[in-house]
Amino acid sequence: MSESGPSPDLEPLVAAIQTLTEEIAKLREAVESGTNPVVARVAASSSAAESAAVDVKPIVSSAASDAIQTAVDQTLVFLFSAAMTPNEEDGFDAFVAVMHSSRTDAPLAVQNLRQFSWKALQKNLGTYLKDPYDPTSFTVVRREPRELEDSVTSIKLYLGGTRPSDTPVNLRKDDAAGGVWRVTDSSL
């Protein structure tokens, strides 16, 4: 007689995958409805971004600095969550949703993202996460600029990991998407 459902040792993994799938569905719904996915997710639950932000504290303690740091961290959480999504198409759609419009507007841009950046991120995901099942377990080791103010429109983060040097990720406010923070370039 066969058992129904996953074996007990796989239950945490199955639960994590189900949670990620639900989060991707929420992100897709937010993107399709025209709402700002980063702000919607942060408003719903900022605990993930708070966990990711533990390693780097803003130099200037202000509401603007905290909001920028939370939004940027949440963008990275979305990026890593996309790479963890079991369904290839859903994951890639979520990945494209966090890419800056300047990276997706050209005729072959999305195809190139899929072939190069997306595949590299999926392959190297474990390099940047302390826990391979937790998209918030990355470490930001430094940030340029160090001080975050309302006037800041681009940020360069360096992620720690198992590589010999820190890995840069560039983010910029995307005017075509209501000013949300999106990834422009990364070596992930």
Image (spheres, rainbow, N blue to C red):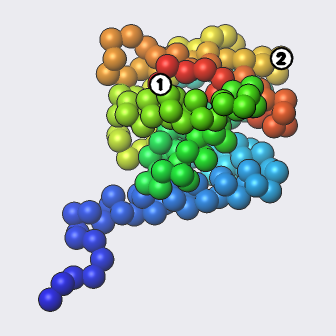
- The amino acid on which the numbered mark 1 sits, given as a three-letter code, is Leu
Find residue 35 and report its horizontal and vertical position in percent: 80, 50
Q: Toward the viewer: 138 or 95?
A: 95
Question: Which of 169/103 is in front?
Answer: 103
Q: Residue drawn 67% across and 10% down?
A: 145
Helix, strand or loop status at disc 2: loop
Question: Dot 1, crowdedness within 10 Å: few (<14), some or many (≥20)?
Answer: some
Spot the residue most to the bottom: 1
Q: Earlier in the sequence, mark 1 or mark 2?
A: 2
Q: Quadrant of residue 177?
A: top right
Would you name the residue on which mark 2 appears?
Answer: 151
Asked if 102 appears above or below 28 in the picture, the reply is above
Closer to the camera: disc 1 or disc 2? 1
Residue 48 in view in this figure: no
Q: Residue furthest front?
A: 107
Give the residue type that dot 2 points to.
Ser
